[in-house]
Image (cartoon, helix red, strand yellow):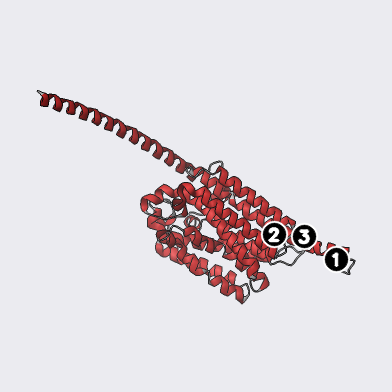
Amino acid sequence: MFLARSWQRLFTLRQAATKCEVRNFIFEYKFYKSYRIKSTAATTSFKTEDSHSPIKEKISSKLVNNAPKDIQPYLKLMRLDKPIGSWLLFWPSSWGIASAGVPGCFPDLYMLALFGTGALVMRGAGCTINDMWDRDIDAKVERTKDRPLVNGDVSMKQAVVFLGGQLGIGFSILLQLNWYSVILGVSSLALVVTYPLMKRFTYWPQLVLGFTFNWGALLGYSAIQGHIEPYICLPLYFAGVCWTIIYDTIYAHQDRLDDLSIGIKSTAIKFNEDTKLWLSGFSVAMISSLLLSGALSSQTWPYYTSVGLVASHLANQLYTLNINSPSDCSKKFFSNTWIGFILFSGIVLGNLFKNKTVETKLTQKKLPL
């Protein structure tokens, strides 16, 4: 009798436990389903041209979509419909060109135009190389599954020929510079080719991208001066590397779930919930390097004002960043082109005031100019 009651009690407890497990499973499933729906909706909102997409991105996209059908896939392969990458590649070059300018004068407009064209072409070449390496990975990521090499609009053979044409144009632009700069430019090609592979081996592909994207800070300076001044160029280059880690980590958070599922590495995955803390550290390093470069190059108050504006932009960007919202990450990423423009403007204006400062000092001392 006692055994019968014991077995009955155990059976009742087991039923209760089973019901509890079922309720927990149903709750977890509903939570997961809700989370995936929100995540998918956020990703879909990123793919559309929503309100946060800059006007120039929308214009570029329309121009590409209105181009002849035969060349549209190639324009998309080089991301001509998304010019933000070309701007982010160009700005460090403009910093170098402006820093090397003669005090009291505007930077060399021909060199700015030449480097602008080079940034457009070489960014396109870099995207082509990236898509060639990553075509299998891109097919598994929501944001990249419609790229030309994934959907079959461009074959691998066609991509290789197209890449050769882009590199040829890029090299012809490089040959317009002095030989010191030609050698310096060619030496960056190893970074351009190997960067897309880094996400397979290290959680720091953004660091390698920083080395690649900011090479122009060195190249732009040497194009004007025929050499680099380490005390000016290296702090400027390091600041650019930190900046790239900041904006590309934010960019990588859009794909964090997909990257985790297929085993791709990034600083977004490494930093995870500590992203704001890490990026705050890189922001401090960036601003410190800019201040050092300015001090060693005898910059004037407009430059330091621009550095202050950059610091304010970074602080606001990180304070309001929502790493779990692909839409917000995209918006913050796009806003970084303003950082490049603000700093370029500060270097130019600061350089113009250098000569005026010298003239003022000479006038005060009553010395002949």
Vertical arrangement, residue 101 with respect to residue 308, above or below: below
Q: Amino acid at mark 3?
A: Phe
- Could you tell me how far apart the alpha carbons at marks 2 and 1 are, in whole angstroms? 23 Å
Q: Are marks 1 and 3 in contact (CB under 8 Å)?
A: no
Q: Is residue 65 at all visible to an observer of this figure?
A: no
- Which label lies toward us, 1 or 3? 1
Residue at 49% x, 62% y is: 208
- The structure residue drawn at horizontal position 40% and vertical position 38%, both measured from the top left corner, is 35
Quadrant where the image shows the C terminus: bottom right
Q: Which residue is mark 3?
A: 353
Toward the viewer: 242 or 68? 242
- How many numbered badges does the structure rendering display? 3
Q: Judge the density around disc 2: few (<14), some (14-19), many (≥20) Cα neighbours within 10 Å.
A: many
Residue 185 position in % (x across, y down): 56, 70
Dot 2 amino acid type: Ile
Gap between marks 1 and 3, in whole Å? 14 Å
Considering the image in quadrants, where does the N terminus appear? top left
User: Can you identify the residue that label 2 sits on?
Assistant: 347
Give the label on residue 362, or none.
1
Q: Which mark is residue 326?
A: none
| Dot 1 or dot 3, earlier in sequence | 3
Q: Is residue 3 left or right of residue 146?
A: left
Residue 366 coordinates in the image, percent (x, y): 90, 66
Rendered location of residue 279, percent (x, y): 54, 52
Residue 324 visible within the image: yes
Outermost right residue: 366
The answer to whether 323 is drawn above or below residue 8 in the figure is: below
Q: Amino acid at mark 1?
A: Leu
| Mark 2–mark 3 distance (CA, rounded to whole Å) | 10 Å
The location of residue 199, given as percent across then percent down, is 43, 58
Closer to the N terminus: mark 2 or mark 1? 2
